[in-house]
Image (cartoon, grey):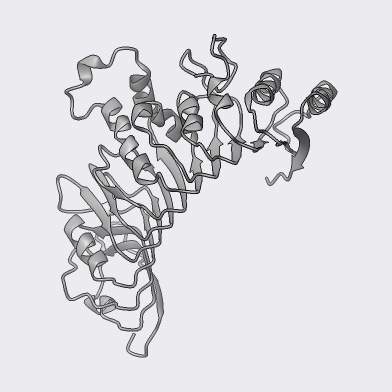
Amino acid sequence: MVRGVSEINLSILLDLESRDDYNLSPKVFENKKLVKLELRFGVDISWLDRTIFLPMLKTLVLELVSLSVDKFEILLHALPALEELVMVDIVWKDCDVADVTVSSASLKTITINSSGCLDTLSFDTPSLVYICYSDYVVGDYPLAKMGNLFEARISLCVIEEDITRARAPNNDWLEDDEDNVVLGFGNVGKLMNGIRNIRYLYLSPNTLEVLSHCCESLPVFNNLKSLSIKSDESRGWQAMPVLLRNCPHLETLVLEGLLHHVTDKCGDACDCVSREEKGRSLTSCPVKVLEIKEFQGTMKEMHMIKHFLDYFPCLKELKIYITENDPTKREVSEVTAEKIKLYNKSSSCNVQLLVSGYHA
């Protein structure tokens, strides 16, 4: 560091019997030339004070690092040039209630993967353009200031017990319970409001199900051009109709899998449950390009594809991807291929059956 190093990548191999984290020297946080700092595994920086001097630091990576909430906020405020923050499996110390705020005027990209057991998580990041957030749903998102966000990847984690509780028909008696999982899911709407200016959005299967509990508070995504949603047979599509209706300028929709958990609240985005106002949410969506990945060639999927062709009014191109050489999936039958040809002939949309590479 005395010689002017610009990048440090430090991991500590500890004696597993002692279980004590390594107290990093304060000198690591006093360097006028350091641009990138990566701290991983067994480092304790919960002692940090206000003597931090890293005026050139642009990238900070913290993985399995012990940290306190107040010292984390001090650290961020002391990094005027910070552009990239990565947080993985943070161990929050010395706090009964973990209310964390990521606050930085310069920060442009954030990656959070299992940030630890938090009660609340806030973002005061007006310059942020990219966020990848993969973690368990926290109790609340009091502040989500991300007005310049361009792309977001949201992969919320949930336990099966919470999904079962949230799907229960009568949750009214739990409304006054601060730990009510349904109320926690509902607060995700605040996070979505904070990212309402995005152009590109990716949602995981769990995230889509969680959003079904805050549909009334979902914002209109006026700038959203591309929406990617991954599906799972155990997770529902209840939020899909609202999402499609709230994307008035959507151009590309990517569905990674079509099979999902079917309920009477699936909405009209699919044809799993017959309803009078079939396809209403699709008719208001201006999407021009639809990509379907992980296609398995089942009749149920074919019916959904026909549903999309019938009700997306502006659809110009439909790309259906099968997986090449995947031993876990059967080949697409000739009947399926013939149906796709018929769809192509009877529709103004260009329907393509494509092959995607398989990687073991």
Q: Quadrant of residue 292?
A: top right
Q: Is residue 104 above or below residue 272?
A: below
Residue nearest the viewer, comparing 255 with 15:
255
In the rendered view of the protein, which quadrant contains the C terminus? top right
Q: Residue 309, can we see it?
A: yes
Q: Residue 18, can we see it?
A: no
Please state the horizontal and vertical placement of residue 285, each as a whole percent of the image: 56, 31
Residue nearest the viewer, comparing 25 with 201:
201
Please state the horizontal and vertical placement of residue 252, each as a whole percent of the image: 61, 41
Please state if 263 lies on the left or on the right of 182 as rendered. right
Q: Residue at x 73, y 45 (%)?
A: 357
Please state the horizontal and vertical placement of residue 117, each as a whole percent of the image: 27, 44
Q: Is residue 249 above or below residue 64?
A: above
Q: Quadrant of residue 306?
A: top right
Q: Residue at x 17, y 76 (%)?
A: 51
In the rendered view of the protein, which quadrant contains the N terminus? bottom left
Please state the horizontal and vertical placement of residue 309, each as a whole percent of the image: 69, 25
The furthest residue to the bottom: 3
Please state if 274 lies on the left or on the right of 30 as rendered. right
Residue nearest the viewer, comparing 329 with 210:
210
Q: Residue at x 29, y 82 (%)?
A: 31
Q: Residue at x 19, y 68 (%)?
A: 48
